[in-house]
Amino acid sequence: MLRALPLIAAAAALAACSSTPGTASPRGIAKFADDPRLGEETKRICFASNVDGFSMNSRDSVVLHEGRDRYLVEVAGSCLDLDSAEAIALDAPTSCLTPGDAIIVSRAMGGTLGPQRCMITKMHKWDPKAKKPAEKAPEPAAEENPA
């Protein structure tokens, strides 16, 4: 019985951490629906061989850099090592990246067994300098002057 106690405690802890139905947070590009940095969807990124960096990586999205251009890329499901990737490569049969192509994720230590292949589902332009428009201050009410 005493040996089962840690297992029961672990099961209770996991149950407490599980999400309740209807409270799932948005994933992938949907997380950025109201973000002014999110641009229009694109079906082709034609710099696949010139990617010079990446940022904002999570398990289901990453921003790819090529010079000044930025693109938010969503991958199918969860790409377990993408959020802590040390290097990525692109697997595209042409010089243009399209949905259905893949990101190859590598970690030096502690990752899954070898590089992970994550299929791309959506791509959007990304403007890191975009900001929400300043809200207009309400105009003062016009004073009525009786004549």
Image (cartoon, rainbow, N blue to C red):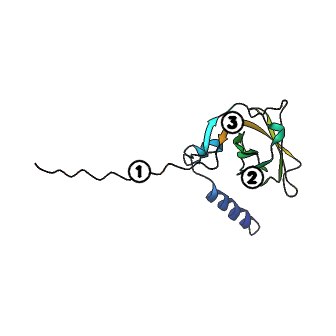
The residue mark sitting in front, 1 or 2, is: 1
Residue type indicated by callout 3: Lys
Q: Is residue 45 above or below residue 69?
A: above
Three-letter code for the amino acid on which mark 1 is drawn: Lys
Q: Residue furthest front?
A: 147
Secondary structure of the residue carrying tag 3 is strand
Which is more toward the observer, 102 or 76? Answer: 102
Residue 70, given in percent of the width and then of the height, sits at 70, 44
The residue closer to the viewer here, 107 or 16, is 107
Mark sitting on residue 136? 1
Tag shown at residue 83: 2
Q: Is residue 90 visible?
A: no
As drawn, is 53 to the left or to the right of 10? Answer: right
Q: Which residue is mark 3?
A: 122
Question: Which mark is on residue 71?
Answer: none
Percent of width and height locating residue 72: 69, 43
Residue type pointed to by label 2 = Asp
Q: Is residue 112 left or right of residue 6?
A: right
Query: Residue 104 occupies which quadrant of the picture?
Result: top right
Q: Which numbered mark, 1 or 3, is in the foreground of this view?
A: 1
Q: Residue at x 82, y 41 (%)?
A: 50
Name the residue nearer the viewer: 52 or 33.
52
